[in-house]
Image: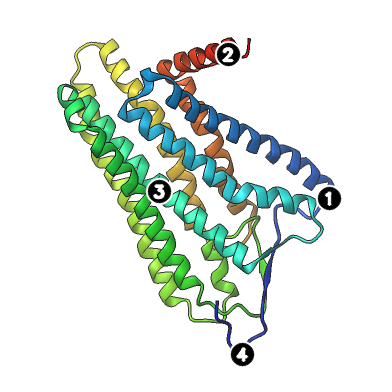
Amino acid sequence: MALKNHSVIFEFILLGLSADPHVQTLLFVLFLGIYILTLMGNLLMLLVVRADSHLHTPMYFFLSHLSFLDFCFSSATVPTLLKNLLSQKKTISVGGCLAQVFFVFESGGTEACLLSVMAYDRYVAICHPLLYGQMMSNQLCKGLVWGSWGLGFLDAFINILLTMNFDFCGNKSIPHYSCDLPSLFPLSCSDVNTNFAVLLCSSILHGIGTCFLIVYSYIPIVSSILSISSSSGRSKAFSTCSSHLTVVFLFYGSAFLRYLMPVSGSPLELIFSIQYSVITPMVNPVIYSLKNNEVKAAVRRTMRKCFQYIM
């Protein structure tokens, strides 16, 4: 990163969640427990989908990638949070901060695309059930997933490439527990107008754009469900979408609330950030496990096989 005639800044100070050592200890125990549950839940989902042949379908193929994304998303921010909760010097290098921004963008952008892909999968399953196998071919599923990863990477790469030209000078305190791009704008003595415009455009494409695709997919889904004559049939059809809808509301709700608020380090902003980057990756596998009988049955079968192997 090229730095011009300004005071060189090699690290930022993350102000975190609390300055009270006793509160920090409690928060460390809490977030360590959440992080362990997140890793275990998403790794278990990956293992179950891969090991159980009953789940080798497009829906669970997408779900396995969602679990991997949640694993990466949480790992991009929580380890730094845990380290700083135990450290007197709550710093992160400029390079480490930019790397964290990149991986948060990559994970978040890819997850937004993947959720819209999963909405399309539910649309085909409910509105065109007889053509599901033909429309959701293995080649198309892989293309949709790698396209999601590619768009997420492109979004992150463009934003971080422009950010690497920043000159950081003066204040180096970030009123947050992790690095994100909006928090870096006030710390730069460079012109950030181009960066802000690119961030706004990419946020609209990834946030509003993918949200529109999800709504567009669910309009015919709701219409098809309401046209089913039996209440049991409507309930069964809706149950196949309820897990996905719950994850969508959690992800987009917390993301919009987080990024629509000005960067201030206020308690409300930190709460929305924790919901977005810490809590949501933990609860996603729980939502799909509790609301899906196929997943629960597959978990039991996988655990039974593991116990038999051990014994």
Image spot of residue 299 (x, y percent) = 50, 17
Front-most of residues 84 and 308: 308
Q: With 100 as the anchor, is 236 left or right in this view?
A: left
Locate the C terminus and report the quarter of the image it occupies. Answer: top right
Task: In the rendered view, tell whether residue 142 sits above or below residue 7.
Answer: above
Which tag, 3 or 2, sits closer to the chain's start? Answer: 3
Front-most of residues 224 and 153: 153
Q: Pointers 1 and 2 in contact (CB under 8 A)?
A: no
Q: Pointers 3 and 2 in contact (CB under 8 A)?
A: no
Pointer 2 residue: 309
Q: Pointers 3 and 1 in contact (CB under 8 A)?
A: no
Q: With 259 as the anchor, is 148 left or right in this view?
A: left
Q: CA distance from mark 4 to mark 2?
A: 64 Å
Q: Nearer the viewer, mark 3 or mark 2?
A: 2
Pointer 1 residue: 21
Front-most of residues 1 and 108: 1
Which tag, 3 or 1, sits closer to the chain's start? Answer: 1
Graded by Cα atoms within 10 Å as few (under 14), some (14 to 19) or many (20 or more), the crowding at tag 3 reads many
Q: Quadrant of residue 193?
A: bottom left
Q: Nearer the viewer, mark 1 or mark 2?
A: 2
Which tag, 4 or 2, sits closer to the chain's start? Answer: 4
Which tag, 1 or 2, sits closer to the chain's start? Answer: 1
Q: Secondary structure at mark 2?
A: helix
Q: Quadrant of residue 185?
A: bottom right
Which tag, 1 or 4, sits closer to the chain's start? Answer: 4
Graded by Cα atoms within 10 Å as few (under 14), some (14 to 19) or many (20 or more), the crowding at tag 4 reads few
Pointer 4 residue: 5
